[in-house]
Amino acid sequence: MQFISRCSHGGRVQVGYNKKIHTKNKLISDFDGVSLYPSTMKRLSLEYGGILLETSNILDQLTKEFLDSVDGYFVEIKIIKLRKVRSFSVLGLRLKDKRLYIDTNLEGSNVLVDKTTLDMPIKYNEIDYVNLKGYFFNDGRSNTIGKVLEQLI
């Protein structure tokens, strides 16, 4: 369970390329989303069919084709090549007690990701990677939480 919990992480505060910005005598806008958990659970139900069911299985097939065929997965990947650097990284490197959100440190790094998170660096950073290890779920999903949230809205 510890492996799976390390594959997800909460919110962050960041400016482009993690560069410090000093502003004096100017107004700034701070946009912060609140109460995002319910909207995330609703989206999970609508887009993916809900929360993963049953127990995890140890991955013995590490191909993307296999991973795309299952309901969900949590894997450790090693990033071999990163073709595009973005001003806001889609991945965070876990370094002891903090996360580092900057693409320039990703090549050669091991990163823990879930099914949704892996698709982002593939699409936005055009990464080459290898799957090292992980777990998969393939017993369906429950959309109960989405139905409950629909009743509350």
Image (spheres, grey):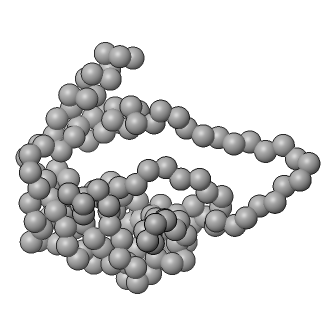
Q: With respect to residue 81, does 95 lie above or below?
A: above
Residue extending furthest right? 25
Q: Is residue 78 visible?
A: yes
Q: With respect to residue 66, does 84 lie above or below?
A: below
The quadrant of the rendering that contains the N terminus is bottom left
| 118 and 35: which is toward the camera | 35
Total labels: the figure holds 0
Quarter of the image for residue 134 reads: bottom left
What residue is rendered at 22% in x and 40% in y? 51
Q: Going by the image, does 140 lie left or right of 88? A: left
* Residue 41 pos. (x, y %): 33, 35
* Residue 75 pos. (x, y %): 25, 66
* Residue 141 pos. (x, y %): 16, 40
Q: Going by the image, does 43 lie left or right of 24? A: left
* Residue 133 pos. (x, y %): 20, 73
Quarter of the image for residue 8 reads: bottom left
What residue is rendered at 45% in x and 72% in y? 95
Quarter of the image for residue 94 reads: bottom left
